[in-house]
Image (cartoon, rainbow, N blue to C red):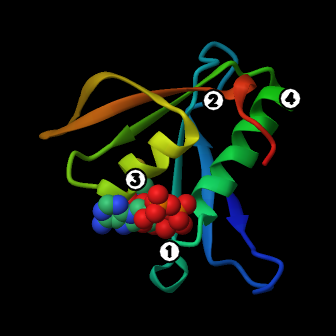
Amino acid sequence: MLAIVPETVGRPVGMVGLFGLNRSDRTPRFGYWVIREFRGRGLAVTAARALGRWAADKLGIETLVLDVEPANEASHRVAAKLGAGRVGEVTQGTVRLARYELAAGRLTRT
Ligand SMILES: CC(C)(COP(=O)(O)OP(=O)(O)OC[C@H]1O[C@@H](n2cnc3c(N)ncnc32)[C@H](O)[C@@H]1OP(=O)(O)O)[C@@H](O)C(=O)NCCC(=O)NCCS
């Protein structure tokens, strides 16, 4: 889990992280969260892209998985802006989540 600290703000305003990474599972999930007053500035997309590049470059991860609730329009938008592809659905408890896959090695640095 990494904090999102914009240079202009100088304090954490959100987080981005990898989940479920271990030696046998090389396809971790990732997630992000930004506090309300700092949303809509591209922070989630920028942070997720940096995380994905780091995972590809430093850990050799090829694919990251993202699960999104159907009504979470902002997160679906973040997934689209990252270039993640929708690959199906998964069930978590009683909730059906849309599953995306992101080709980490193909992420650009900008
Ligand atoms: C999802 C979340 C991380 C997005 O953070 P963010 O920094 O605002 O994201 P970005 O600014 O990088 O991009 C957000 C995009 O979603 C769009 N968006 C925001 N709210 C939206 C809404 N209610 N409906 C549709 N699109 C929406 C923005 O317009 C933007 O797209 P654009 O650049 O094309 O205009 C933030 O909303 C959040 O923390 N939500 C609660 C936690 C959460 O849901 N995490 C994801 C779990 S899968």
Q: Which type of secondary structure does the marked residue at label 1 adopt?
A: loop
From mark 2 to mark 3, how far is it between C-alphas? 21 Å
Disc 3 crowd, CA 10 A, few/some/many (<14, 14-19, 20+): many
Nearer the camera: disc 2 or disc 4: 4
Residue 75: image tag: 3
* Residue on which disc 2 sits: 21
Q: Is 107 placed above or below 68 here? A: above
Nearer the camera: disc 4 or disc 3: 3
First along the sequence among labels 4 and 3: 4
From mark 4 to mark 1, how far is it between C-alphas? 28 Å
* Residue on which disc 4 sits: 57
x, y percentage for residue 69? 26, 47
Q: Which type of secondary structure does the marked residue at label 3 adopt?
A: helix
* Residue on which disc 1 sits: 39
Left or right: residue 70 compared with residue 29: left
Nearer the camera: disc 4 or disc 1: 1
Nearer the camera: disc 2 or disc 3: 3
- Which residue is pictured at 25% across the width and 26% down the height? 89
First along the sequence among labels 3 and 1: 1
* Quadrant in which the N terminus appears: bottom right
From mark 4 to mark 3, how far is it between C-alphas? 24 Å
Given the image, on which type of amino acid does mark 2 rest? Leu
Given the image, on which type of amino acid does mark 1 rest? Arg
x, y percentage for residue 24? 63, 13
Nearer the camera: disc 2 or disc 1: 1
Given the image, on which type of amino acid does mark 3 rest? Ser
Mark 1 beta carbon near ligand 1 (under 8 Å): yes
- Which residue is pictured at 71% across the width and 25% down the height? 106
Contact flag, marks 4 and 3 (Cβ < 8 Å): no
Residue furthest top as drawn: 24
First along the sequence among labels 2 and 3: 2
